[in-house]
Image (cartoon, rainbow, N blue to C red):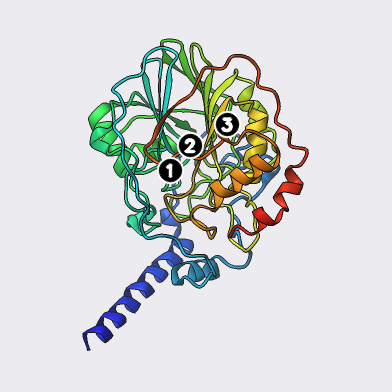
Amino acid sequence: MIAAVLKIAGAIVLLLVILLGLAITVVPRFLDRIYYRGPPSDHFDGERFFNPGRDDTAEIPTGGSRIGFLWRYFTGRDGRPPWPERVEVHPSRPPARVEGERMLVTWIGHATVLVQTHGLNILTDPIWSDRTGPWRIGARRVAAPGVRFEDLPTIDLVLISHNHYDHLDLPTLRRLWTRDHPRIVTSLGNDAVIAQAGGAKATTADWGGEVPVGHGVSVVVVRAQHWGTRYSTDRNRALWSGFVVRLPSGGNFYFAADTGWGDGRWPAEAASHGAIRFAALPIGAFRFVPGQMRIGSHMGPIEAVRVFDRTGAGLALPIHWGTFRLSFESHDTPPRMLAALMRCTGNDPARFAAHAIGMGFEVPPVSGPRPPLDLSRLDACAGSAEVRALQ
C-alpha cells in the first residue's frame, strides 16, 4: 500500500516538474527582461544579440518541438545511456597565492576553473550549487566541486561568460561577493542578472572590448558561438562570450566558455591578443541524437581539437563535461573521444587531456610559437570504429 502511494506521489511530482518545464517555454511576456540597451551592431539588432550569420544556436538540438524535447528529457524516454549517480571526487586545497610566472590550474568541475598566477586568483563561471536551472529544478551535480568553498582562496577576478544557469549561478556569486568582493567581468547585459546576487557589481564589455584589471593584467572579451536566456522569453537579451586574460609574462589564459564551432574564425581572434599559454576548452554536451558530434551551441571533441590547434595554446584543459548531465552522451565519452582523436592524429594527448576534478596541475610558460598540430587525419580518425563506438 505504501509503495503504491509513493509511486503515485512520484508520478504527480514528475508531472508537476514536466508542466513547469513546459510552462517556461510559454510563459507570459512579463518574464521578459531588458538587460541591455545600446545601438545596433553586427551582432545586436537593438533588442537582441545574435551570432554572425544569424545562426540560431537555440534551436531544438533533436529537431521537432520544444514541448516534445522537454517531455522526453524529463521522462527519460530519449534513449540516453546511463550516468553514474555520483562520481568520486577528492577535493584539494589550493595555495593562497601563486606568485610570478608560475601558473597553477585546478578544475573545480563543469566550466569552473581556478587559475592562479602572478599573485592573482581567477575563477571562471563559478558554480557550487547542487542543481542548475530556475528554482533549482535543473540538472543535478554528479561530481562534487573539486575545491570546497571554504577552502577556496580569496578570489580576485571572476569571469562570467553568459547567463545560462550552469554558468551564471546566483547563489555562488552571492557567496563570492559577500566574502571577497572580486572584480567581475562579463559581456553586455549580464550585469543586470549578476546584480541579483546580493548587489554584486560587474564590469561589462562588448566583443573585442578590453577591461584593465591592474598590475599589467587585463581581460579581453572575445567572440563565442552561443546564446543566452534565463526564462526563455528573455532569449538573447544579454551577450555571450569567451575571455582572454592578458598577463604580464609567460603567455595568456584563454577561457572559451560555452561555444559551438560557428564560422571557426574565433579561435584565431582569441590568439591575436598574444600567445596563449593555457586554454580551457569545452568538449561536452554535444550529443542529443545517436552519432551526433556537435550542435550549434556546443563543440564536441572533434572541433575542440581544431580549436586547440587554431589557438596555438601550449596546454589545454577540456571542460564542460562530467559534472552536470546536459545531453545524451555517456559520462566519460567526451574525454575518451578526445584522447582517441589526439592519439589517432599522432599528436601528444598530454597537451590536451582531461584532469581529475580537484587535481591542481602546473602550466609551463610559453617559450615560443607552438608548431601547428597535424590534423590531416582528423576526419578519418573521427570516422574510426573506436570513436564511433563511443556512446
Q: Secondary structure at mark 1?
A: loop
> Decide: marks 1, 2 in contact (CB < 8 A)?
yes
**Can you identify the residue that label 1 sits on?**
167
Residue 342: image location, x then y, percent: 64, 40
**Can you identify the residue that label 3 sits on?**
351
Q: Earlier in the sequence, mark 1 or mark 2?
A: 2
Indicate the amino acid at tag 1: His
Residue 304: image location, x then y, percent: 62, 40
Q: Which sits in the foreground, 133 or 118?
A: 118
Q: Which sits in the foreground, 372 or 113?
A: 372
Q: Earlier in the sequence, mark 3 or mark 2?
A: 2
Q: Which sits in the foreground, 294 or 388?
A: 388
Question: Which residue is located at x 64 percent, y 35 percent?
Answer: 307
Q: Report which quarter residue 226 is drawn in.
A: top right
Can residue 107 be seen by looking at this rendering? yes
Indicate the amino acid at tag 2: Ser
Label 1: how many Cα within 10 Å (few below 14, some 14–19, many 20+): many
